[in-house]
Every structure is written in structure tokens, then in C-alpha cells.
Image (tube, coloured by chain):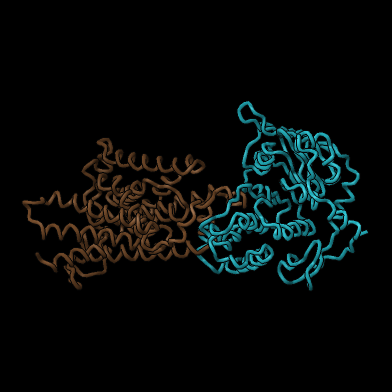
Amino acid sequence: MDFLTIISDTLGELIAPTTAAYVLAAIGLNIHFGMTGLMNMGQAGFMLLGAYGFAVTQSMGANLFASVCAAIALAVIYALLLGIPTLKLGPDYLAMVTLAAAEIIRIIGRSTAMTKITGGSAGISPQDFTTQFEGTSPLPNGATTFLLWTYNNNIANSWWLRIVAWILVAVAALLCWRWFHSPWGRVLKGIREDENAIRSLGKNVTTYKMQALILGGIFGALGGIIFVLPRSVQPDSLGRAVTFYTWTILLLGGAATIFGPILGSCLLWVLLTFVKEVMRGAIPDTVISSNQVESLGWVIVGVALMCLVIFRPQGLLGDRKELAFDA
Amino acid sequence: MREIKEVKPEVKPFQDLAKWATKAPEGEKLISTAYGDKVTKDLKFVDNKPGVHKPDPILVADHVTRKFGGMTAVDVEHFEIERHGITALIGPNGAGKTTFFNLMTGFDTPNTGEWRFDGRDMAHMQPEKVARMGMVRTFQLTKVMSRLTVLDNMLLGAPVQPGEGMFRSLIPGLWKKQEQENVEKAEALLERFLLIKKKDDFAGSLSGGQRKLLEMARALMRDPKLVMLDEPMAGVNPALKQSLLDHIMSLREEGTTVLFVEHDINMVRHIADWVTVMAEGKIVAEGQPKSVMNDPAVIDAYLGAHANIDLGDDSVLDLKESEEH
């Protein structure tokens, strides 16, 4: 068993683009759920739309900025479509609608009728949409080793992508910090606590909820772009499971905190990788096959999460006092 | 009659909250009774009958009905609230008082009816717009934002702020000054409502009575023209009640009209200028507090078989009056 490989692989998850993508998605979900109390059960839908918006326009030859704008625009339109009929209703309706809508997007994306645009279930392969992004890199070609990790500078799962992803995360966290401590954030938290009280104080609750839904959706779409850049656009890789991982990350780190999504995402992926690598190294193939390791990893992480929810229900960074009063 | 003092505008923000309506503690000023006297004078000539017209109404409602299935919860032919007055709305449980509140403030939609507030048509208006017009309510089952601090609860009550825009909120320079003013105002109100020590605690940690106080203080952040209090005294301890009553009366002198629902008849007699009695969705009696209690319709509807029971000791009131004359 090679300890150094296990450690470098495990800690590599700390800075992986996928981890950053989940952080962005969880930051969006934090605006939805942590701040406003909106039960968005389809964050993967926003991510997939962001990914499609970016990749499809890239493959058609649009420039990088226009593609990001297209991804954001799709998220905004999607949020409006979801929000207008459901935000006036109770929170459970939004949960159902978002869950269903995310599935609709995935199923439409992978349908054969859409093969010309989205590539159907095969998706869009990296060479069609990552070249422009890789071209913007100021780094020289080749690979670089930094501390434990060696990655290519510019291509695919690269240093350049890591830098961009984590800068995005930093900007998103900074914006969130600003929003959380502003009167706007205060109104959102008020809506989370009691909509009718906020109405009686003269605030237009539906507008605020719509703003929150759109804003969180935009972060989801950006997360989607980062998610697909090191791999390909695969509709099935952004399915329901991704939404639930995002929820796990948010609740693990602590809802309504700034660093909760970052800590949650890093911890979840590091933990999962660590458990899997150790099992692969320590347990012979004849006892547990590598397929089983994959599933068992999730089982162990799941048990750990259950313990967390039981013993620290507010998440790692949450304030226990807040849980003392339920509604 | 008490001496009428002029209310002078002073530079200090919200100093008037430190004034008292009935008896001022050492070193503090007694507020003017100008509005109270005017309302008493005006209402003296108004007949004591349901749906009567008043000299200067701020809210006028006509033919308001609300049915829940086959049951008619509210059926109000005509109702007026006198400007600057303190109007009490009383009635047995299930009389439709709270439903009427909900209708007036846009939280419920009537089957028929129209009403005008300060000359503006209010029917089919959203609750948030009603509040922005200056008609702010509290709830019978208090609604405080549990996981926000008491101070944040208060700040949410302040009128539309620049920092409440999504983009403007990112630039603190645009809203810091107004926020500071709001904080000062909120702290002055919290002080009056004896909640200042709790200002950094979560509102969820307050007791039931304290939540009532917080809700009322929050409604006043907007400086409403008409404040509608749904059972403001339920669960408030007696010592605090006196201070609250005083505050409601000083509200009148600041030009706020008050409508409140209450079951405590003593309190109603103490502070109300006008009493409206509802039963089974209808207004069955209206009048001066002292005379309306003797109205046979009220005794039937509200007091029922217990009409003979002493509703409270009036000797204190009578004594006070003899001192004043």
C-alpha cells in the first residue's frame, strides 16, 4: 500500500475542479435554501443548463464571454419559468417542480431528437468546447508539479482550470458574504422565517424570492460549466444524484453560512476518496471487488453523514442556537 | 381637562417616544392631549348605533362579506374608523374580528365589499401595498422571525430601504447611513418597549408576551397612519400592560390612528375612544365605551348569561375622574 499516493490523491480532491464546481452549486443552493428557505430539489437542472448553454454555444463558435452569458441567460429564464407559477404557492410545490424540471432538462438533453444540438446521450465531447477556454491560459504548455500534485498546465483537468474555478469560488463567497450582511439578505432571511410577517411589513415577498431563485440558479449554472470543463457534457452525469450531493454538501458545511459550502464540498470529496483509496489498498480484490469499493465508500460516508446530522444537526459551521427554535 | 402642551419638533431623532401620555416619570415630559381631546369632542355627537357615520373617518368599509363554505364569517354593512382615535373592536370568540382584520389588510379576499383608506380604494390590494400605504397590522398569533435577532426584526419593519435592492446591497456606502438611522429609531422603540437588553438575542428566545411587544414595536418602525393590533395585550404581564396602554395613547398624540382587538374589557374602557362590537360576523353595536357596555345587543351577544358578573372594578376610573375635575 502506497501511503503517499493515497494522501496525494485524497488531498488532490481539495483543489479539484469538481470540488469547486460543487462549491459553486452549493453556494447557489445556500442562497435558495439557507437564506430564503426555498426548497430547490433540482440544482442539477441549473448546472446542466449552464453546461449546455456554455458547451453548445462554444461548439457553434461563439466566444468565451458570450458562452458564459448564454449559460447565465438560460439559468435566468429557467428560474423565471419555474418561479412564476410556484413561488406564490408553498415551499413543497417548488421542491416538486424543481425536481421534475431538472429531470425534464436531462431527458430532453439526452433524447435522440436533440442529437444535433446536445449530442444526445453521448453528450458533447471536450474537443468541441474546451479549446477556447484552454487557449486563454497564460501558462506555458506542459505539466507542472506543485507540492504533491502533477497536472497538465492547460489541457483538460488542468492547473489553469483549477485557478479559474477557485477564483470563481472566492468571488462567489465574497459576494455572498456581502449579501448575507446587507439589508437585502436580511429580508431574505425574514422570508425564510415568516413570509406573512414580511408581507405585513410592506415587502414584496414574491419579487425577493424570484431574485433569490435566479441568483442561486446563476451560481448553479457557473458550477455546471466548471463541472463539465475537465470531462465532457454528459446529461446523465448531472442527474438527481448531483442535486443530492449538493444538498449533502450544504447541510454538512452548515446552511446559511458563508464557508459552509466550501468546507462541505472539500470534506465530502476528500473523505470519499480517502475511504475508497484505503479500501482499495488495504482489502484484497478477492474479498471486495473494486466495484463494491465504489458503493461501500458511499455507504461509509453516508453513515458518517447520518452521525453528523444526529450529533451536529446545524452542520459543521452552523450555529446550534439557531436550531433551538423551530418556526 | 389636562393642560395642552405644544408638541415642538426637536432635532434628536424620535425623542417623542420618551414622552408619556398619562403620568410621566420624574424628569420626563407629559405628551399633549390635543388629538385625544379633539376625538372625544367629535365623537360626543355621534349616535351610538351600528354602522354610524363619523366626522373624520380614516377607513370606510362597505358591504364587506366573507364566506367560508356555507358559513358567513364576516358580513359588515358599514364601518368607519375615526382618524386619530383609538377604536376597540370587541366581540366573542369566532365573531369574525380577525377575519375582518385579514380582509382589511389584504391577507384574505372578501366575497363582496369595498373599503377606502384615507380616500384610496383598498379592495384587492396586496398586503405589502397595504402596509406601504400606512396601514400596518400585527397578528393574533405573533409572527416574529425566530432566527433573526430582535434588532434585525425591528429593522425589517423600517420602510423601503436602498440596501434592500439586490445590487445596491453590494455597495454599503449606499445604505450605511440610512441603516444607522434605522438602528437608532429601532433602539429608541426597543427601549420604550423594554426590549433593549434583548436586542442582540434571537427573537425565538423571547417569551410570548415579549414577542407581542416586539411585533408592536416593529409595526411602529414604519410610522403607520393606522396601526391594527390584534390582541396586543394577550400574555403581557400587568406591570408592562400599563406602560403599553400609555404607549398606545401616546401613539394617538403622534397622529397615529389605532384599531385594536381585545378581550380585556377594563383595558378597553381605559383607553378606547370608541368601541365597535362584532358578533357572528356583523357589527351589532357601536358607541362610547361607557354606554356600549350597557347596550342590550352587546349583553346578548358578548356577555350572554354572565351579564351579572362584575366586569371589573371601576372605582379606580371614577376616582381618577374626580381628581381631574
Does residue A158 appear in the picture of this structure? Answer: yes
Query: Outermost residue, top direction?
Result: B70
Looking at this view, is A218 or A202 the one in front? Answer: A202
The quadrant of the picture occupied by the C terminus of chain B is bottom right
Residue B105 picture location, percent across and down? 66, 44
Classify residue A284 as left or right of residue B322. left
Residue B196 picture location, percent across and down? 62, 67
Q: How many labels, in total?
A: 0
Looking at this view, is A321 or A317 the one in front? Answer: A321
Classify residue B3 as left or right of residue A249. right
Q: Colour of chain A?
A: brown
Looking at this view, is B110 or A203 the one in front? Answer: B110
Chain colored cyan: B
Does residue B84 appear in the picture of this structure? Answer: no
Residue A266 picture location, percent across and down? 29, 62
The quadrant of the picture occupied by the N terminus of chain B is bottom right
Q: Residue at x 76, y 52 (%)?
A: B257
Query: Outermost residue, front direction?
Result: B309
Q: Residue at x 90, y 60 (%)?
A: B323
Classify residue B53 as left or right of residue A231. right
Classify residue B151 as left or right of residue B278. left
Residue A221 position (above or below residue A160): above
